[in-house]
Image (cartoon, rainbow, N blue to C red):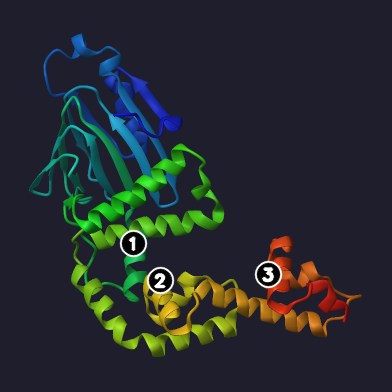
Amino acid sequence: MTEVLSGYRRVCSVDLDEARDRVGEVFCPHRLEPAGHGYRAKAGAAGAVRFNSTGLGAVGLSYLAYGMDVRIRPQPLSSFFLVQIPLRGRALVRSGGREVVSDTTVASIPDPDRDLDMTWGAGNEQLIVRVDRSALQTQLHRLLGRSPSKPLRLATALDLTSPAGRSWLATVEMLRADLDGPGGLRHSLLAGQTEQLVMSQLLAAVPHSASDELDARAGNEASVLPRVIRRAAQLIDDHAREDLTVEDVAEAVGLSVRSLQEGFRRHLDTTPTARLRNARLAGVHAQLADADSTRCTVSELAADWGFHHLGRFAVAYKRRFGQSPSVTLRA
């Protein structure tokens, strides 16, 4: 297996104490000890602990391989969830009285409130997704349009061969490949959307305490989309000048982002983003037509409506109104 996230090296060492400390800095304090015999004999390059880790907002990605049989006993994770995905080998994970034998088809998700005891085999390499607990709960609230009826608890295993499991894993792999390569998803305009996508798909893939509520929500949305979509479109038109996002609109009308997007495509033959852009273009056009060219500039009015890249704004404006914004201002 090719080591991943190699540009984010935290440690590569045969010293288990050093490895424990570096891993603990990212996750939490834990006990780490060899689980087999002959550790010193195997402690060459093949037995080195390799740990690479980076983050994207509320979502972190790590690669971890111990190169030997080890037993790991962390303190309760408390503030975050871990989804541990073996890339090779297998691990035995005991959490909250449940036992998961995790391999390339089954990811383990320890209960963050319970003691954790894991035994990793020598050939076990894992890609670990760390998700902030409060952020995941906020995302669940956003998807439901309200608080869940009970605290969020996830199943301790995820079937990576299921359709939802494969879909979520593909998104994680997309993020991992980008972090290993161009890093475009770290852009401020994309990072938040990416972490929300990872969390939303995780909530769709893993059985949890609010799964039935999410399923019911999805079923109910289909029957109310036309009325809700009209409300969403009006909200966009009325507040286009504000710092409005698609997520804000979805939350305001009580839909998931995906349902809002599907509703706009089905009933309005557009997208929420396109509706917002067109509403802002119309607002700029009206102001430019009434403005005094000696007192204001195109760039000032464009920025006031959320267009901060003047070149792209000018292209979109001319495509919509058939003339450049400067011509409208001077008319």
Q: Which residue is mark 2?
A: 257
Q: Residue at x 20, y 68 (%)?
A: 211
What mark, if any, has residue 200 been given in the picture? 1
Describe the element under mark 3 as helix, strand or loop. helix
Q: Residue at x 21, y 60 (%)?
A: 153
Q: Which residue is mark 3?
A: 316
Which amino acid type is marked by label 3?
Answer: Ala
> Residue 215 in the image: x percent, y percent?
22, 73
Query: Would you say the residues marked 1 and 2 are in contact, meaning their CB atoms lie under 8 Å apart?
Result: yes
Describe the element under mark 1 as helix, strand or loop. helix
Q: CA distance from mark 1 to mark 2?
A: 10 Å
Local crowd size for mark 1, using a 10 Å CA cut-off: few (<14), some (14–19), many (≥20):
some
Residue 323 occupies quadrant: bottom right
What mark, if any, has residue 244 been given in the picture? none
| Residue 190 visible to the viewer | yes
Which amino acid type is marked by label 1?
Answer: Ser
